[in-house]
Image: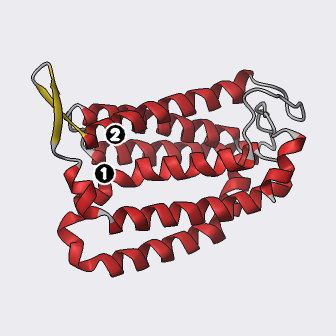
Amino acid sequence: AILVNRLPEHLRAKARFFGLSLAMITRILLLLSLAWIMRLTEPLFTVLAEEISGRDLILLGGGLFLLWKSTMEIHASLEGAEEGERSVRGSPTFFATLIQIALIDIVFSFDSVITAVGLVNHIPVMIAAIIVAVVVMMFAAGAISDFVDRHPSIKMLALSFLVVIGVVLIAEAFDVHVPKGYIYFAMAFSVMVEMLNIRMLRGKKQEPVKLHKKLEEPETETAGG
């Protein structure tokens, strides 16, 4: 939702559809390549007595990518160009947005695919579950994007979650296990508190602050179709 909202309004629905479709395809391809993925858990080299595998490198790269992307989004929202201004540098194109959606989805789903190796005989069921989940997200994505766009605090909260997830991925790349239950509880509690804040703000009829936006360049509209 955050990535898509950086695009012009007439491209957002198309970006959501193609982005989620691309994410679905990448998840299915990851499931179908379980044999190759499992080989990524084998050590490639050793650094300071620590064995480094392909999985560790992917988690490290994914964590750094999430930290970079979320930090840049926070900066652009708070100190970037004002809404309506055109910025040549730092503005996403349609295809760049799709690629970023696919990369983030791979980062999120990679570790869960590895843990699914014990369910290799149920691949068709998992593929069907992915398709159903993506279809549901396609119907809900528009409403979620509009909600995030109307409530900047939710956007900042989501970006802070990405920072936390990036740190967790980097920690797991170095075999430091972080219990996911603590992370999920913290996220759920934060969202609950913020929903209460939004409800109180609505009762006072007070408008939320407006975050800065960097929109796509006009010439990139043709790239979107």
Position in image of residue 80 (x %, y %):
75, 24
Position in image of residue 51 (x %, y %):
14, 32
Residue 75 occupies quadrant: top right
Instruction: Name the residue: 63% across, 52% down.
Output: 98
Q: In the figure, 144 relative to 75: above or below?
A: below
Instruction: Name the residue: 37% across, 61% down.
Output: 30
Position in image of residue 64 (x %, y %):
43, 30
Of the pair 212 and 63, the residue shown nearer to us? 63
Q: What colouring style does the render use?
A: secondary structure
Quick check: can you spot residue 199?
no
Of the numbered discs in the image, which one, if any, rests on residue 111? 1
Relative horizontal placement of residue 123, taking residue 41 as reference (left or right): right
For marks 1 and 2, the one nearer the N-term is 2
Relative horizontal placement of residue 55, taking residue 216 as reference (left or right): left
Q: Amino acid at mark 1?
A: Asp
Mark 2 neighbour class, 10 Å CA radius: few under 14, some 14 to 19, many 20 or more? many
Q: Amino acid at mark 2?
A: Leu
Quick check: can you spot residue 140?
yes
In this view, the residue farthest toward the left is 49
Of the pair 31 and 177, the residue shown nearer to us? 31
Instruction: Name the residue: 50% across, 47% down.
Output: 104
Rendered-image quadrant of the C terminus: bottom right
Of the pair 118 and 153, the residue shown nearer to us? 118
Residue at the disc numbered 2: 59
Kindly report the distance in space between the C-alpha atoms of the residues bearing marks 1 and 2: 8 Å
Of the pair 1 and 221, the residue shown nearer to us? 221
Instruction: Name the residue: 56% across, 33% down.
Output: 69
Mark 1 neighbour class, 10 Å CA radius: few under 14, some 14 to 19, many 20 or more? some
